[in-house]
Image (cartoon, rainbow, N blue to C red):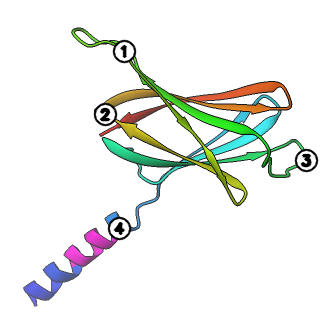
């Protein structure tokens, strides 16, 4: 009986990790409503796929913008600042990019949207582990 209970608890823990919800951030960027999703919460050192959905004021998806994800870690003692850029590509109604975080810690992220000669930015922070 003890083995069965331990097996069940192990299964539930593994299933919980396997189906853990990713990170989702909803923010206003200029005239757009922007939803940024990362598959992992918290983000991890290494590859972190990013999905960006952009809607205009009427709720319609914006599919004709240029989107770039800039991510950086400020300078620390004995270490220069790290700055990276990832161009997002359109897939369906969303833009996709990949952030390759080189170390754990606090990262600044800026999703930059260019459309019709106008630019909008959504900024947020993440903590990679």
Q: Which residue is mark 4?
A: 18
User: Disc 1 designates what residue?
Assistant: 81
- Image quarter in which the N terminus is found: bottom left
**Disc 3/disc 2 C-alpha distance (Å):** 38 Å
Question: 10 Å neighbourhood of mark 1: few (<14), some, or many (≥20)?
Answer: few
Q: Residues within 10 Å of mark 2 (few under 14, many from 20)?
A: few
Tell whether label 2 touches label 1 (CB within 8 Å). no
- Label 3 vs 2, first from the N-terminus: 3
User: Residue 37, position in %: x, y?
Assistant: 55, 49
Read off the magenta span: 9-15
- Looking at the rendered structure, the secondary structure element under dot 2 is loop
Q: Nearer the viewer, mark 2 or mark 4?
A: 2
Residue at 84 percent across and 43 percent down: it is 56
The numbered mark, 2 or 4, whose residue comes first in the sequence reads 4
Distance from disc 3 to disc 4, alpha carbons, whole Å, reads: 36 Å
Earlier sequence position, callout 1 versus callout 3: 3
N-terminal-most mark, 3 or 4: 4
């Amino acid at each position: 009986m003890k083995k069965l209970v331990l097996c069940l608890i192990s299964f539930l823990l593994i299933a919980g990790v396997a189906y853990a919800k990713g990170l989702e951030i909803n923010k206003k960027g200029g005239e757009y409503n922007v939803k940024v999703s990362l598959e992992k919460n918290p983000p991890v050192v290494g590859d972190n796929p990013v999905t960006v959905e952009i809607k205009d004021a009427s709720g319609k998806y914006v599919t004709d913008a240029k989107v770039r994800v800039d991510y950086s870690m400020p300078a620390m003692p004995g270490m220069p600042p790290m700055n990276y850029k990832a161009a997002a590509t359109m897939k369906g109604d969303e833009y996709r990019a990949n952030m390759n975080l080189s170390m754990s810690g606090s990262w600044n992220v800026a999703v930059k949207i260019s459309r019709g000669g106008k630019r909008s930015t959504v900024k947020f922070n993440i903590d990679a582990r």
